[in-house]
Image (cartoon, rainbow, N blue to C red):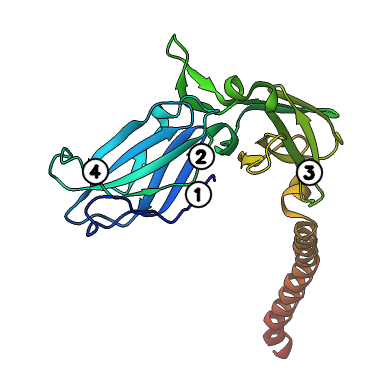
């Protein structure tokens, strides 16, 4: 997650008003939340977003919260922004005195937003081929027709995906890379495979790897051994031996008891 923390600087204004500390940018798929501390008491916060080449924009005016969604003022994702967290009173700020404020670290959405989890739409293992189809995460930004832009629409050729896969019940991983929405892998047709996908921006210095998708596993040719291992066969074998032993021994015991009973019944007759 793209987080930055910077100690504040106090400028002109009421020196008794506390200023924000621990200012952080939290951004996933360009959804960006600015957070800070402490909770205000007897005063409010107002957020100003300053771009290096854009006008200052105000958000969360006179808020008592310690976070602010600034996504809609960061649409120029390649711009570098700084946040000023102003500490203000309930009175109007028209006394020509600049309120005290704290300054965040710089934030560039294109370079610092975290790539979210890709959504695996379909997968199939047929013979020695494993095919996986997935979908790009969506961003909060829209096209003129109202449809949401995906991270691929913004990053374009800077974006690629990596799939990590391994034989079920094994720990040895392999990987494959694509710039499309599909993977086609050559695999062992007699084995099941597990896998996950994550987005990658190779050109980045930080936050290169995105969040990992859910882990999924194929089930072609899955049997009891794959699910439970060799232990289940040992248990089955023991049970089988017990059943066979009972099948042999029980009739013998019953037969002996029957003969013994018959012998006891004849004894009084022999004594007459």
Crowding at mark 1 (Cα within 10 Å: few <14, some 14-19, many 20+): some
* Residue 26 screen position, x and y as percent: 47, 43
Instruction: Tell which of 231 and 239 is nearer to you.
Output: 231
Is the C-beta separation of discs 1 and 2 under 8 Å? Answer: yes
Q: Which residue is mark 3?
A: 166
SS of the residue at dot 1? loop
Q: How far separated are the C-alphas under marks 4 and 3?
A: 50 Å
Q: Which residue is mark 1?
A: 4
Q: Nearer the viewer, mark 4 or mark 3?
A: 4
Mark earlier in primary sequence (3, 1):
1
Q: Please determine whether, in this image, residue 54 is positioned above or below residue 253.
A: above
* 21 sits to left or right of 80: left
Q: Which residue is mark 2?
A: 107
Q: Nearer the viewer, mark 2 or mark 4?
A: 2
Is the C-beta separation of discs 2 and 4 under 8 Å? Answer: no
Q: Which residue is mark 4?
A: 63
SS of the residue at dot 3? strand
């Amino acid at each position: 997650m793209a987080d930055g923390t910077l100690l504040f600087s106090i400028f002109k204004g009421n020196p008794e008003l506390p200023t924000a500390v621990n200012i952080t940018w939290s951004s996933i798929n360009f959804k960006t939340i600015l957070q800070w501390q402490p909770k205000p008491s007897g005063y409010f916060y107002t957020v100003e977003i300053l771009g290096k080449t854009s006008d200052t924009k105000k958000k969360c005016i006179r808020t008592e919260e310690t976070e602010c969604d600034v996504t809609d003022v960061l649409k120029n994702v390649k711009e570098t922004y700084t946040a000023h967290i102003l500490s203000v009173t309930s009175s109007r700020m028209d006394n020509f005195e600049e309120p005290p404020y704290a300054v965040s670290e710089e934030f560039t959405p294109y370079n610092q937003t975290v790539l979210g989890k890709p959504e695996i739409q379909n997968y199939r293992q047929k013979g020695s081929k494993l095919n996986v189809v997935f979908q790009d995460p969506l961003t909060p930004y829209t096209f003129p027709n109202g449809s949401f832009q995906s991270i691929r629409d913004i990053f374009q050729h800077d974006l690629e995906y990596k799939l990590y896969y391994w034989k079920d019940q094994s720990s040895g991983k392999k990987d494959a890379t694509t710039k499309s929405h599909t993977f086609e892998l050559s695999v062992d047709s007699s084995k099941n495979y597990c896998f996950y996908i994550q987005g990658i921006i190779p050109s980045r210095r930080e936050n290169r790897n995105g969040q990992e998708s859910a882990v999924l596993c194929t089930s072609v040719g899955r049997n009891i051994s794959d699910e439970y291992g060799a232990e289940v066969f040992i248990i089955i074998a023991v049970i089988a031996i017990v059943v066979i032993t009972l099948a042999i021994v029980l009739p013998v015991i019953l037969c002996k008891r029957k003969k013994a009973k018959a012998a006891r019944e004849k004894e009084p007759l022999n004594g007459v």
